[in-house]
Amino acid sequence: MITKITPVEELKQIFLEIFLNKTDKVSDISDASVLNGIAYGCGKLTQRTLTNQAVIEGHIFPDSAYGEYLDNLAAIRGVAPRFGAAGSTTYVRVTADEGTSYIAGVHRFSSTSGINFDLEESVTVGVNGYAYLKVRSVQRGLNTNVEPLSINNVLPVPNGHISVVNEYAATGGMDFENDKLFRERIKTSMNQLSRTTLSYLEQVFMKINPRVLKLYKGGIDTNGKFILIVVSINGQNFTEEEFNELLSRSQEYLSLSELLRSDESYALKLENVNWLPVDVEFRIDIDPAYDIDVVRKNIQIQMNKLFDYRNWKYGDRVEWETLMYVAKNTEGVRYVPDTHFFPQSDINVPKYRLPRIRGFVMRDLDGNIIEDNKGLLADVFYPNEPDATYTASVLTTI
C-alpha cells in the first residue's frame, strides 16, 4: 500500500499549524473552540479520503485485491477469467476386433475411482485391432484427473471389444478457483516461455488446434520462407485450411518480423511430416497359453512408442536392436531369432523427416505368416503438453 492513513488527531494539528501560520486573528484553539471543531472535521474528511484512496490502491495489486476487484485486475492484465469447476480429458486405447465401433453418446468409460468418461467422437477400430479415443469426464473437479491405467471399463460393451486402458493420466480437471488460487495465477501470468522459440509457437498452435503435438524446423524454401513441420497427436495430416487457421489466428501473438514479410505475405510455411517408413519383419515363438493376436498388438503398440515425437531429435537413429528387444520382451513371447529379424542394422533418419512403423510382418518359426500389414502406416498417439499457466494467461483471446 502506497498511501499512509494518518490519524485524525495528527491531521487536525497539521490543519491548525497551517491556519495559525496564515493569520494572527485567532488564538483560541481549545477543545471547545470553533476552530478546533473545524480542524477536527477537516482532519476526519481528509482521513476518509486517504482511506478510500488506500482501498483503491489495494485493488491494483494482486496481493490485496479480492472478489470482483481481483476479477477486474485479471481482465486488465489479460489473464483468463476465474476458472469454474472443470472436467478432465485423456485418451483411452481400446483393443478390439476390426470393425468394432465405439459411439459417442452411447458408450461410456469408467475408472476404478468411479469417474465416468464420455467419447468426444465415434471411432471404428481398423485392421491393426486397436485405436485411441479421446474422452472427457462427466463429473467436474480436481478428482477427475485420474491416474494412468485406471480407466478399464466400458458400458455397454460393444461387440468385438477386448480391453480398454488409459496409458496417460487425465488432465484439465479443476475445482472452482477461489481468490487465493486466482491470485496466484495472476501473479504468475507473465510469459514463462521465450518468444520466437519453437516452444512458444507450439503453445500458440496447441491453443488454436488441440491436435498439434510438436513443431520441428524444416529449413528454408526456395521463396525464403521458414518451414515449420507440424506433427499431430495421432499422426494424421493437417489440411491446408487448418494450416491457414494456425497462421491467421496466431498473428497477434507473433511480431511482424516473425510472421509477416515486407509484402505482408507469411514468412512461415507450415508442412506436414514427410514420414520415413520403417518396415519390421521377424519370426516368433509364442507361448500357447497366450492369445497370438493380443501378443501381436502389444508388440506393435510398444514399437510405435519408441518413436516418441515429443522427444525425437534430428540425428536420432532407429536402432534395430531396440526394436528386437521390444519383440523379445513382450509378455507371452518365448523366442525371437536374431537371424530372422529385420531390419538388421540401424536406420539413419534424414533431417526434416520422422520415422514411423509401416510394414509389420510377423511369422512363426517355420516362416508361416501370422500377421502381414505391409504398406500400412501404424496408428500412433502421443498426448500434447500445453503449459496450463501460460495458456491461461497470455493466450486468453484465442
Image (tube, grey):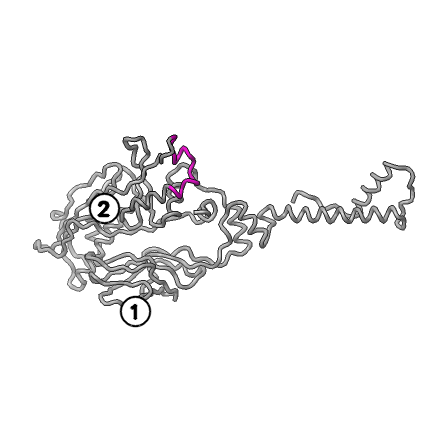
Farthest residue to the front: give it: 263
Q: Which of marks 1 and 2 is in front?
A: 1
Residue for badge 1: 156
Q: Position of residue 90 (x, y in %)?
A: 35, 56
Q: Magenta region: which residues?
A: 248-262
Left or right of residue 26: residue 311: left
The crowd level at tag 1 (other Cα within 10 Å; few <14, some 14-19, many 20+) is: few
Farthest residue to the bottom: give it: 156
Q: Residue placed at 85% from the left, 49% from the top?
A: 37
The crowd level at tag 2 (other Cα within 10 Å; few <14, some 14-19, many 20+) is: many
Look at the magenta stretch and give its main secondary structure. helix
Label placed on residue 267: none
Between 257 and 18, the one lying in front of the other is: 257
Residue for badge 2: 356
Q: In which quarter of the image is residue 257?
A: top left
Which amino acid type corresponds to the residue marked 2 in the rendered image? Arg
Q: In which quarter of the image is residue 262?
A: top left
Q: Residue placed at 15% from the left, 63% from the top?
A: 288
Q: State whether residue 396 is above or below residue 114.
A: above
Assess whether residue 251 is covered by the magenta stretch.
Answer: yes
Q: Describe the element under mark 1 as helix, strand or loop.
A: loop
